[in-house]
Image: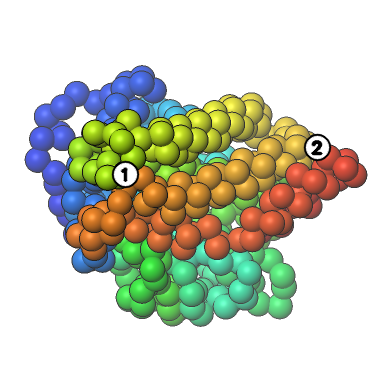
Amino acid sequence: MTTTDNRPATTPGWAAQPAPRTEAEWLARARQVREVLAADAAARDRAAATPYDEVALLKSSGLVTLLGPAEHGGAGQEWPTAYRVVREVAAGDGSIGQLLGYHYLWFWAARLVGTPAQIEAVEADATRNQWFFGGAVNPRDADVTIRDTGDAIVYNGAKTFSTGSKVSDVTVLEGVLEGTETHIFAIVPSAQEGITFGDDWDNIGQRLTESGGVTITDVSVPWEAAAGFVDKTFQPRVYNTLNVPTIQLVFVSFYLGIARGALETAAEYTRTRTRPWLHGGQERAVDEPYQLDLYGDYQSKLWAVEALADQVAQEALAIHHDAWNVTAQQRGEHEVRVAAVKARATEVALEITSGIFEGLGARATQAALGFDRFWRNVRTHTLHDPVAYKRREVGAFLLRDELPEPTWYS
């Protein structure tokens, strides 16, 4: 497979900077990216233009190969760092944080389900070529079928959602083999005649994620590129089911990043522009008791959930390091912890992004300021799957010692 950039672009200045090496340096690079994105995030949200330049920024910063093997030019970092990087980027722009998080998942997915040979080949090519990944995956709907033609499989159908679409170099396809219930994943170039993106993403939030529909017509893939298949038979492992806990932690990361961006942007506005209430007896908004209570409450809650997210990410690291020997018990207990942090992150992000207006004042509702984008972004994506079922997983584990059954959502 060759690289298939949709629109080659560079960002002046990045190439001249030394490449980060440590986790701290990569987080510093992510904060630089955040600052670039935050500068015009509200305007770009209103324009809702395809984020070619934003993805070029991610590439030139080196963030796209954060999980790539060092021997192929990647950073060789681990998931706990990747989650924190997504948080930083999402604080500047929630859409771009989601794109980066999904990219990390699909970049790494070969390691999740692939054979050793597939893992080595995909990670080497993706790292060297700085592929940006998109995904046409929605296993809830049997809307893409796969035909076995002997040496190859052929995808046909459509997907309602295809995050990354036009800005991706490669797309992860998912479909069901005809006459079976077998799902097959494969990586294909995004720019080809058989893939048509619908340009129909018109949602209230996460407007730059290019998450619209896609039509797939006679896209052929060699059987040897079918992820995890050997002689047309899938190689099952408990580790194969870690896709859900991992993507849910990606969700947690950009929810918390968006909440952090909302809180810090609001705090700066309150410090510099919000006026004290004329009957409150204070000369500055930052001296108002209700302001101190509001921001203190939100900061405390956010710190608590960020700490839990970091802890759960570290717990997952041991599972990733022993991927070939994961037990059902390990997987289930980890999923319960993920469910818990997903529930808390959803709630704190919705609370902060809607509640910051209490500390801003009426003038902050100007459309040009775009404070509403934080809530719109969180509200849009937190509907991905009902958070009540995450709380149910935790309750069932506590009361009945019941592990979540691995599904596409648990």
Q: Where, by quadrant of the figure, is residue 345 drawn?
A: top right
Residue 298 versus residue 82: which sits nearer the camera? 298
Coloring scheme used: rainbow
Instruction: Of the two numbered discs 2 and 1 on the same chain, state the one appearing first in sequence.
Output: 1
Q: Secondary structure at mark 1?
A: loop
Q: Amino acid at mark 2?
A: Gln
What number is the disc on residue 329? 2
The reply to whether residue 106 is in sight is no
Residue occupying image coordinates x 27% and y 45%: 278
In which quadrant is the N terminus drawn?
bottom left
Mark 2 → mark 1, Cα distance in angstroms: 59 Å
Q: Secondary structure at mark 2?
A: helix
User: In this picture, is 22 found above or below 242?
Assistant: above
Residue 388 versus residue 351: which sits nearer the camera? 351
Query: In the picture provided, is 77 more to the left or to the right than 402?
Result: left
Query: In the picture provided, is 405 more to the left or to the right than 194?
Result: right
Query: In the picture provided, is 344 more to the left or to the right than 172?
Result: right
Name the residue that disc number 1 marks. 279
User: In this picture, is 197 found above or below 83?
Assistant: below
Residue occupying image coordinates x 42% and y 74%: 214
Residue 62 versus residue 315: which sits nearer the camera? 315
Q: Nearer the viewer, mark 2 or mark 1?
A: 1
Q: Amino acid at mark 1?
A: His
Residue occupying image coordinates x 44% and y 54%: 354
Residue occupying image coordinates x 11% and y 29%: 16
The reply to whether residue 177 is in sight is yes
x, y percent for residue 279: 31, 44
